[in-house]
Image (cartoon, rainbow, N blue to C red):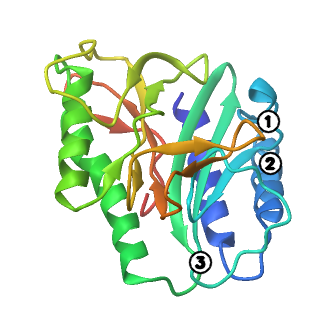
């Protein structure tokens, strides 16, 4: 798991470095694919339930599952990149939202709040806590900053399969859900919208957009539950 997650995190970082005006989302996807393969791993997302790319690249009002293609990034866009790598029987999974050049104050605040909400959540990713202790902390932080958390999609267990039990919502009452035990690995992934939490899935069956067309951001890491503090497995410098 640690090695799979290390490869995954490095792929995310590479994608983030490529987010700049004039670059196509397809070019970022190709770079992610080539890097993961160069490390002896396989892109977890490629052909997963028919998904046609190695990375989900979601721009502006696309929340998750954006399909890379000919779109050329422009100044002011915000770009969410979600990647996974499968290595020696285990998956890593992580995501982040990156600014493309200079972005609006609101967009930067959205990115910052989304990322911080992850860290607020994993304060409760501890032995004996309940899954929804994480969920409640994320929701409370996001909503206190005037944004909303997506409810139609949630985090999840990750390991030998890309998506495993338990589900890890980004909202809900504390003290509920499965109890966290050392050795569990979960993907905690706040998906945060500027406006309504409602989303729509486009006709391609993948691309998920905010119902009101406002901006969305996404931040995710694979986290190991230990006897002490949680360990972020998809860690790179600066996360």
In-image side of 237 versus 60 (left or right): left
According to the picture, the residue beneath numbered tag 1 turns out to be 46
The disc, 3 or 2, on the residue closer to the chain's N-terminal end is 2
Frontmost of labels 2 and 1 is: 1
Q: Secondary structure at mark 1?
A: loop
In-image side of 30 versus 13 (left or right): right
Mark 3 Cα-neighbour bin, 10 Å: few <14, some 14–19, many ≥20 = many
Q: Position of residue 205 (x, y in %)?
A: 73, 35
According to the picture, the residue beneath numbered tag 3 turns out to be 100
The answer to whether one can see residue 229 in this image is no
The disc, 3 or 1, on the residue closer to the chain's N-terminal end is 1
The answer to whether one can see residue 101 in this image is yes
* Residue at (68% x, 46% y) in the render: 207
According to the picture, the residue beneath numbered tag 2 turns out to be 33
Q: Secondary structure at mark 2?
A: helix
In-image side of 164 versus 59 (left or right): left
* Residue 166 figure quarter: top left
Residues at marks 2 and 1, CA–CA distance in whole angstroms: 9 Å
Q: Position of residue 13 (x, y in %)?
A: 59, 60
Q: Classify the position of the C terminus by image quarter.
A: bottom left
């Amino acid at each position: 798991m640690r090695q799979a997650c290390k490869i995954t995190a490095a792929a995310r970082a590479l994608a983030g470095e490529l987010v700049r005006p004039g670059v196509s989302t397809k070019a970022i996807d190709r770079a992610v694919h080539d890097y993961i393969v160069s490390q002896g791993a396989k892109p977890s997302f490629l052909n997963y339930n028919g998904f046609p790319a190695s990375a989900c690249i979601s721009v502006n009002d696309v929340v998750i599952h954006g399909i890379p293609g000919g779109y050329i990034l422009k100044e002011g866009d915000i770009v969410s990149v979600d990647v996974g790598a499968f290595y020696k029987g285990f998956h890593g999974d992580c995501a982040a939202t990156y600014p493309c050049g200079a972005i609006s104050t609101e967009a930067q605040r959205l990115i910052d709040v989304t990322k911080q909400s992850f860290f607020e959540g994993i304060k409760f990713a501890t032995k004996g806590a309940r899954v929804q202790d994480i969920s409640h902390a994320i929701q409370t932080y996001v909503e206190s900053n005037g944004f909303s958390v997506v409810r139609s999609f949630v985090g999840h267990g990750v390991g030998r399969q890309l998506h495993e039990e338990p589900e890890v919502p980004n909202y809900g009452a504390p003290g509920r859900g499965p109890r966290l035990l050392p050795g569990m690995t979960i993907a905690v992934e706040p998906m945060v919208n500027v406006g309504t939490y409602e989303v729509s899935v486009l006709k391609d069956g993948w691309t998920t957009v905010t119902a009101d067309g406002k901006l969305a951001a996404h931040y995710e890491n694979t986290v190991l539950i230990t006897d002490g503090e949680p360990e972020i497995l998809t860690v790179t410098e600066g996360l």
